[in-house]
Image (cartoon, rainbow, N blue to C red):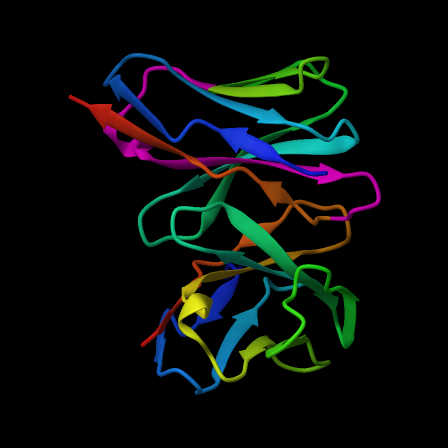
Amino acid sequence: GEDVEQSLFLSVREGDSSVINCTYTDSSSTYLYWYKQEPGAGLQLLTYIFSNMDMKQDQRLTVLLNKKDKHLSLRIADTQTGDSAIYFCAESFTGGGNKLTFGTGTQLKVEL
Amino acid sequence: NAGVMQNPRHLVRRRGQEARLRCSPMKGHSHVYWYRQLPEEGLKFMVYLQKENIIDESGMPKERFSAEFPKEGPSILRIQQVVRGDSAAYFCASSPDRGEKLFFGSGTQLSVL
């Protein structure tokens, strides 16, 4: 079955790096995504990675994918207070179109 | 190019009433998805529609819930005879084609009293 797990909370100091982790169970994933949700807002697509890639970097964001361990991580360099939000990982499947399975979300709190 | 527009932003209903949630996809997008987010949970897929067709409704509750995406106008998620357990944030997303990235709306927060 499809199951995506994330730790619930992460607290970091401003300027430090944040690493948000995600594990998934279905090996037929095609794309894996990271979304950001700020209070009262919809989901903002931050970045995504194709399942045959190991790493993707986009400015302050680095996505690492370990397909063998079914582990996905999002690293945010130089974390700012504006990065405080809930971060969701999600996966889509071959033949599933854009039917995404989301994790429960990680609440990132950035402290001064 | 406006994003995915959902309205209302907040909807309050009493038990037994009907809730109608509207979603206008981004311009040029003909694929619409509805997701539900219960308190402190991730989003759960409900239904995937193309114009005038339901493609996948495997996440829809069997009773009281229905969705449509007519040839003209927004997609509608309809919940009949709402119960307190229907209280959640309902998000709509659209994409230009199957397999393309999703763009999400800001959601409709449904509260059932």
Residue B56 locus on image (x, y percent): 76, 62
Relative to residue B27, is residue B16 drawn left or right? left
Q: Residue at x 44, y 87 (%)?
A: B17
**Quadrant that contains the C terminus of chain B:** bottom left
Out of A3 and B26, give the one closest to the viewer.
A3
Work out whether residue B10 can be spotted: yes
Q: Residue furthest right?
A: A95
Q: Residue at x 59, y 77 (%)?
A: B76
Relative to residue B30, is residue B24 drawn left or right? left
Out of A7 and B34, give the one closest to the viewer.
A7
| A71 drawn magenta | no
- From this view, report whether residue B82 is shown above or below residue A79: below
Out of A112 and A88, give the one closest to the viewer.
A88
Q: Residue at x 73, y 31 (%)?
A: A26
Out of A49 and B43, give the one closest to the viewer.
B43
- From this view, report whether residue B32 is shown above or below residue B41: below
Q: Residue furthest left?
A: A112
- To which quarter of the image does residue B111 belong? bottom left
| Residue interval drawn in magenta | A75-97
Relative to residue B51, is residue A45 drawn left or right? left
